[in-house]
Image: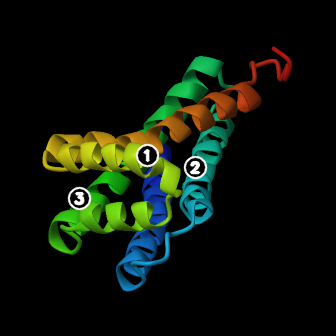
Amino acid sequence: MKNIILKNGIIGGTIVSVIMIFVTLYMKANPDNEPSMIVGFGSMFLAFVFVILGIKQHRDANNNSITFGKAFITGILISLVISIIYVIVWLIIHYNFFPDFMEKYGEMVLKNTKPEDIAEKTKEINQMKEWYKSPIMVILLTFMEILPLGIVVSLVGALVLKRKANNDINS
């Protein structure tokens, strides 16, 4: 099981991190253009396909049966590996190559905000800038970008792929 978790987690983490690197490079090169949220979340969904594959591999290795609990734990552990890789790569990018990320991100967001929403959005951005002064908050905020999606995919994958030893799919 450890091999399944690590293999799928590392592959998923690599995929989402490589795309994050390209999106970050794009953002640095084009500060006036906001990166696509579709690309960001799409890369996360692509990475979390490996949660589903890992649960299925665990089920296949267990005579084609797995309980919801074991499937969910497998999914969560793969999601954690993916998320940890994502967070580590972001920390490396942020602290070594893009330390002014929050300044640039704040400028970009405010530039694309409706005039009537500027005051509220400015307050929000200033709060994020304060949070980004603490490495612990950077880590927590980065986990909050990716891990909730991993939990949802793990739940769905466990529900869809659970199967009792008698091959009763509806149990």
Is residue 38 toward the left or the right of residue 5 in the image? right
Q: Nearer the viewer, mark 1 or mark 2?
A: 1
Q: Residue at x 75, y 24 (%)?
A: 163
Q: Residue at x 25, y 64 (%)?
A: 103
Mark 3 is on which residue type?
Leu
Up/down of 145 relative to 112, above or below:
above
For this rendering, which residue is in front, 154 or 170?
A: 154
Q: Residue at x 50, y 27 (%)?
A: 73
Mark 1: few, some, or many residues within 10 Å (few <14, many ≥20)? some
Marks 3 and 1, Cα distance to the nearest angstrom?
13 Å
Marks 3 and 2, Cα distance to the nearest angstrom?
21 Å
| Residue indicated by mark 3 | 91
Residues at marks 3 and 2 touching, judged by CB atoms closer than 8 Å = no
Q: Secondary structure at mark 1?
A: helix
Q: How many marks?
A: 3
| Residue indicated by mark 1 | 145
Q: Position of residue 31 (x, y in %)?
A: 39, 78
Q: Position of residue 19 (x, y in %)?
A: 48, 70
